[in-house]
Amino acid sequence: MLKIYGFPASNYFNMVKMALMEKGAPYEEVRVYTGQSEDFLAKSAMGKIPCLETPDGFLTETSVILEYIEDAVDGPSFYPVDAFARARARELLKYSELYLELPARRCYGEAFFGTGPVSDEVKDAVRPILEKGCRAIQRLGRFSPYLAGDDASYADFVFMHSFPNAAAVAKIVFGWNLNDALPEAAKLLERLNQRPVAIKVAEDAKNGMREFREAYGMKG
């Protein structure tokens, strides 16, 4: 059985979890809050989560894990059949990761964890990337009704666990409504969040955030 290491407050963990659930794959969750122990580094060479235990060994990096799930796990495909359309879905997935999630993550301390304001230097670096990322996804996304076309894809699973966090950062740190930069997002997220798997993942994430805060002695 596949085992996913991480914790359900992690949006990256939830991208993988959602893919496994949408595939109907049996899997086990192993609770890990990242680390640099030799035991965990033997599973995840950078000490990052999520990592996926497969019959052949461990895999890390969410986009790589999603590719493995698509190739190795029975169930419905979450990429288009056409080669170019598949590449476009992968492109949109990477845009969400590189130009929404990762830059916003630099402000997570201020936005979510009460560690104090980020520097003006960080703010000046992050906002332009978010602006450009939204414009790029607006240009490339089809929203018909899903990000890459008629059917839900891994691009949607990554977007729905990237854009809301980026939007929260934009609101809290910059006083900026990210939906103004990507007006198609609200309708897409509404559709995605109605999926039964998404409802279950969101419920687990809420409980997981409470566990995460308790584990690290955080208030709230």
Image: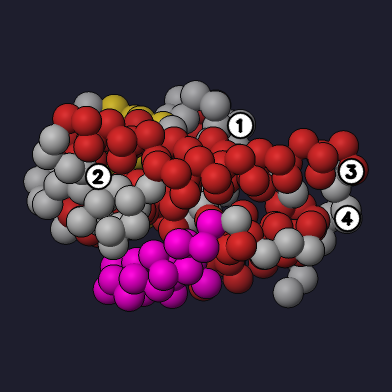
Would residue 163 be found to the left or right of residue 176 on screen?
A: left
- The one nearer the camera, 39 or 52, is 52
The circle on residue 116 is 4
The circle on residue 2 is 2
Q: Does the residue at mark 4 contact the one at mark 1 (Cβ under 8 Å)?
A: no
Q: Is residue 173 shown above or below 190?
A: above
Dominant secondary structure, magenta = helix
Give the distance between the C-alpha atoms of the residues marked 3 and 4, in whole angstroms: 9 Å
Q: Residue at x 60, y 71 (%)?
A: 210
- The one nearer the camera, 68 or 207, is 68
- The one nearer the camera, 125 or 212, is 125
Instruction: Please tell me whether mark 3 or mark 4 is closer to you in this view.
Output: 3
Q: Is residue 100 visible?
A: yes
Q: Does the residue at mark 3 contact the one at mark 4 (Cβ under 8 Å)?
A: no
Q: Earlier in the sequence, mark 1 or mark 3?
A: 1
Instruction: Please tell me whether mark 4 or mark 2 is closer to you in this view.
Output: 4
Q: Which residue is mark 1?
A: 36
